[in-house]
Amino acid sequence: MVQELEARTLLSFLVIDSESGKAEAEITTTYTYWNGGVFTSHEVVESQFNEGKSVSIAGRLEGVNTSYSFSSHAEMTLGPAQYGPGSLDAHANGSGTVALRIAPGPGEKEGDPVSLTVEITPDVKGGGVANVALTPFNKPGTYVAHIGDSITASIDFLAELTGVNDIGTPWPPITVSANMNVRYTVSPALPPDIEATSLAWNSGLGGVDYTYSIKNSPLPKPATVALYWSPTTTFDPSTATRIQGTEVTTEIAVRDYPPVHINASTLATPPGGTKYLLVVADPPSNSKPSGEVAESNENNNILFTTITVAEVNHAPLLGAIGNRVVNEGSLLPFTIVGSDPDTGPGAKNVLTYSASGLPAGATLDSSTGAFAWTPTEAQDGSYSVTFTVTDNGTPALSASETITITVAEVNQAPLLGAIGNRVVNEGSLLPFTIVGSDPDTGPGAKNVLTYSASGLPAGATLDSSTGAFAWTPTEAQDGSYSVTFTVTDNGTPALSASETITITVAEVNQAPLLGAIGNRVVNEGSLLPFTIAGSDPDTGPGAKNVLTYSASGLPAGATLDSSTGAFAWTPTEAQDGSYSVTFTVTDNGTPALSASETITITVAKVNHAPRNIVLNTDSIDENSIFTLVGSFDDPDVLDLHTIAIDWGEGIPQVFTLPVGLRAFEASHRYIDDRPSATTSDVYTIDVLVYDGIGSSTDSSSVVINNIVPAVSLLTNTSPDGEVEEGQTVFVRGLFSDIGVSDTHTATVSWGDGTTTNASVLERQGFGRVAGSHIYANGGIYTLALTVADDDGGTVVKTTQAVVAGAGIRDKVLYIVGTNGDDDVMVSKQRIGDSQATVQAGFLPNRLKRFTSSWFDSIIIYLGDGDDKATVSVNITTPTLMSGGRGADLLNGGGGSSILLGGGGNDTLNGGSARDLVIGGGGRDKLVGNGADDILIGGSTIYDGTTSYDIDVAALQAIMDEWNGVGTYQVRTGKIRRGFLKVGRTIKLGGGNVIDNLAADVLTGSAGQDWYFLSDGDSSSGRRPDEANG
């Protein structure tokens, strides 16, 4: 026979430390096989085998043998602890399978029966558990198997080590091991058919015994054949004798010798009978077998006889079934196999299967012998069942075997009854019981349940045995809590069921607490401060613990802060006595809850000095009145008070107030700010309030500000050119000062770089100043009078002096005429001459010469009168002439000229360069002459109201733009639109050019002129390309 072995093994080891320690394990597994006398082993060693790790081992061996042994050895060594603390709980779990197939050998075929012997030897050391389950043979013994069958061994291995020492204390290595041995032995059986070769007559004991031999039979003894002689069917062959030579018919019954089945059909004769050789040993002398004598050999006669084989019913055979093992809930299917030795036409070999002791739910097919059973959860245990096969003979014969069916318990997860979310008020008990059930029943059921929970709030309890939960949430525990409840059985491994619920703790409002306040005593006029303190036992997110303080019966003037509980009261003089006040603290619940206490506040009568003087301050000008406004407190309402005020000037003021009056006013005039030479001074005002017994003082202050003097009048003797150069100009002024005690000084700046002191006459805040000055050159000068008081205050007032004459200032040659008829001529003897000559009747000697390089422009101011001014053509310096009132004749020179006629009927003749000619009031005649000129019959906003206040800068800016390099259109456009110069926009046109309503005549020249013609004006020589306005 050939045995094919396939061995697969899976070992997993789990090392668990229940208290956060660390264990190290070394695992050794050994598998040993004997095949054909050859020793083979497979070993795996895993060192430092820590928590949660597993190892698997698989192998396959083949060989030829009739005997096979399998053994496994698993050993776990737990090394010294590395760190702790806690107890070490170690579990090593192993499982494996070995599959054996019986293959046919030479001359064998699938299905041939064989004899199978099974031995199981578990060996467990060191505290482990080992189990072996064989399929289909689950216990040691000898069974009928068949070639081609597969036998599987399942091995479970468990080694446990719990509560080993304390990890905090090192301990030596501990070893746990388990062994498992399984042996199979397969032997050949007799072939199902036998061959009879002879029948022998044996004499002895006074009877006959017929034997036959079996060809190639390995049986230890031959089968016995009994011959029954007809017609006596009850003939006992063991005692029967026959007369030799008598002819008989024999019936042969073949007896079975288990385990060999002898088929009687092998002795049957074919039609006509079969002759078997009978050997008669030492027959009696008077008898011998009937039949033909074939041969004589010594004392034996060999005869042939005819044997007729009659059918005899034999009991059927039942193939070995063997004990069976099945898990509850799993199908156990197998088929019992019966056979019948009876063959032939009359054989009673129709078989029927039955069983006694069948468990509930099990079935057996009476025709096929097919058995099937799926044990329920409640059917774990052992069941004795007798299986029987019965033929259809008369009487019926049968064969039986009683086996044990073991139903192994299979653990199932327990069930947890629905719990659902729960709601409880804080401070209230929440009791309920979680209910678990286990579908496992029966003797081996792992249905001992334990209850646990994760996420339990502080203070909550769960009875692990009954599932009873109880929790009374504290005030601070309102909110939502997620709790997972679990029911666990005692299986290995343990199974469980869980449900996570939400426990909502609702906030329950509780009344606040008010700290003891107690009665209070205070003197009238004294502050009584205290704070009432409330607290609220409600805490947590939804707590209604916002407190508000209130009181009933509060005296007038008393206050209580509703947020802080701060109480304050200063009883008045009239409030002595006792007051009953109820203080209350209230939370923000719905409804709001509160706590109160009623106390008595006693106000004692006390005589008080005046106090809390309040005085105003101010800042006033010198020689002004300061009104001191004051107030004070005195709880004694009937006191009479005297007020004494020291104003800081050594003159105290004393007065008495009416009874009950606590406010006063007093006024004082401060003439001057003392000391001198300061712009302001501070006066300290001391106040004393006296009630006849006690007094109180306080101070205030007032700032006295110096006021600068004011100049009300300033004149000079030459406002319009009345004084000529070299003559004296006088100035006169009047001033006043509110500071009547101030003294003053005065100076005059004459506008030519000279400043002189002026004389001052003053009294009681009023004064007069006077000064004089001689101008060396004519011109228009601004005189500045400065008046200063003794406290540093100053005032400046200006006036303009027009001095007839000529002179250079700031590179400008100024020529100023008088109010009479002036005739001015500016010329050079020839072009290139270094000096210019000014001729005028108001000049000393009527003539004055100036170096041309000392000035770069000329301004001629002519006052009232019919004036004439001419600049010769050899003077190329830009010139501005203002004629003033009167009929004036102005003639421009060789440079650009600005000619202003002013009031009167004027004649204005431009020079040879580009000119700006403005007629002003009256009927004027304007002639442009040589170049591009601007001719305005009326006036502009830049002309001024007199000859001396014209806007020189604006007119010169317009002239600068007109003298630019741009085309006629560019220059007229820019001046018309306006341009930025001297910090402002300057332009001609629009409202800047004013019609004087007189009829002016504007005459152009050879250049391209720009006309400004008003209503009534006329032009002469104006070309189409020359603009108007």
Image: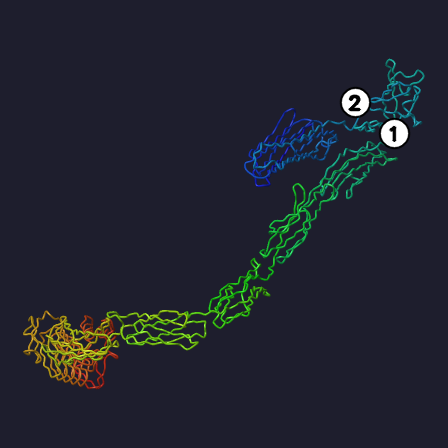
Tell me if 734 is positioned left or right of 695 in this view: left
Front-lying residue, 800 or 323 = 800
Instruction: Name the kind of residue labelled 2 in the image.
Output: Pro
Q: Secondary structure at mark 2?
A: loop
Q: Colour scheme in the image?
A: rainbow
Looking at the image, residue 559 sits to the left or right of residue 1020; the answer is right
Q: Is residue 324 left or right of residue 595?
A: right
Q: Could you say where residue 524 lies in the image, as x and y percent from the top left?
A: 48, 69
Task: Check the image and report above or below for 362 versus 564.
Answer: above
- Determine which residue is flagged by label 1: 310
Q: Residues within 10 Å of mark 2 (few under 14, many from 20)?
A: few
Q: Splitting the image into 4 quarters, where does residue 782 fall?
A: bottom left
x, y (%) of residue 687? Answer: 36, 71
Please, which residue is most extreme toward the top here?
A: 298
Indicate the quadrant containing the C terminus: top left, top right, bottom left or bottom right: bottom left
Circle 1 SS class: loop
For this rendering, which residue is in front, 901 or 129?
129
For residue 220, which numbered disc appears in the image? 2
Residue 657 got which mark?
none
Foreground of the two, 559 or 169? 559
- Quarter location, residue 644: bottom left
Does residue 239 show up? yes
* Residue 929 in sight here: no
**Inter-mark Cα distance, 1 to 2:** 28 Å
Tell me residue 118's x, y (percent).
72, 30
Circle 1: residue type: Ala
Mark 1 vs 2, N-terminal side: 2
